[in-house]
Image (tube, grey):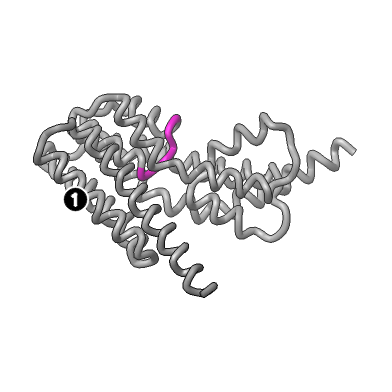
Amino acid sequence: MAEITLSKQSSEFRKGIQAGISIAIGYFPIALTFGLLAKTNGLTVGETIMMSLLVYAGASQYMSLSLLSMGTGIFEIVLTTFIVNIRHFLMAASLNEKSEDDHILNKMIYSFGITDETFSVAATKEGTVTTGYLFGLFSISYASWVINSGIGHVIGASLPQTLQESMSIALYAMFIGLLVPSMKKSVKVIFLAAFSAIFNSIFAFTQILSSGWAIVLATLLSAVIIEAIDTWRGKQRRNFIEN
């Protein structure tokens, strides 16, 4: 019985690896670019790899580099990262309903590997998602991100200094690349981005907050306002239908 169970887990792990290959390939250029930008922002190869090992969140790591370049404090960076990644609570709760019953320790371990891409693959898989499958899916994706981050830093170290400094523009290009697809899918995202830009500009112009806290507060205010407007519109729509 134990051999049958072990064989099944091994088979599920291989299926997870196969499902994650496309994610690993997709992470290659993004992680490589992150490593290059980390080098231009003064991080060592050890610090770059450690950030990918411990944070493992593409958009948040890019944002952290931007905040570090502005001299933002640690607490502001951590808080901003938390706000950006708060959606992971919802993804983890949703995936918990789809995954098989297992020891809480195993769930805690593989929950670290949840990203937008791995969640999409796991959530769209037919039937119950096994622990072995999730470990396989998350392992290859995680390895690709961490390893290619280090490779990007090593490559960046061999580039001419002028080219290294010019790579900082890629950071803004990456943010635009992450934002535009979301804006095309949702009007809320457009208004959220607009309000965030307005609030951050006001805080920057008046200089009442540091750059780090300006980003945090602009993000929070924008999210609260947009959700309040969306909730109010929903109530108005329901009242109109009822009447």
Q: Quadrant of the N terminus?
A: top right
Coordinates of residue 218 in the picture (x, y in percent): 26, 43
Coordinates of residue 55 in the picture (x, y in percent): 42, 33
Residue denoted by label 1? 198
Looking at the picture, does residue 150 appear above or below residue 136? above
In this view, the residue in front, 138 or 229, is: 229
Asked where in the image residue 52 lies, by quadrant, the reply is top left
Asked where in the image residue 183 lies, by quadrant, the reply is bottom left
Disc 1 on helix, strand or loop? helix
Coordinates of residue 238 in the picture (x, y in percent): 50, 68
Coordinates of residue 28 in the picture (x, y in percent): 40, 49
Q: Residue 222 vs residue 6: left or right? A: left
Q: Is 57 contained in the magenta span?
A: yes
Q: Residue furthest front?
A: 243
Looking at the picture, does residue 237 appear above or below residue 160? below
Residue shown at 30% from the left, 24% from the top: 74
Residue shown at 36% from the left, 60% from the top: 188
Q: Is 25 contained in the magenta span?
A: no
Query: Mark 1: which amino acid?
Result: Ile
> Is residue 106 among what the camera can see?
yes
Asked where in the image residue 83 lies, by quadrant, the reply is top left
> Is residue 39 among what the camera can see?
no
Tell me where the magenta segment starts and ends, as one range.
Answer: 54-59
Q: Residue 52 vs residue 159: left or right? A: right
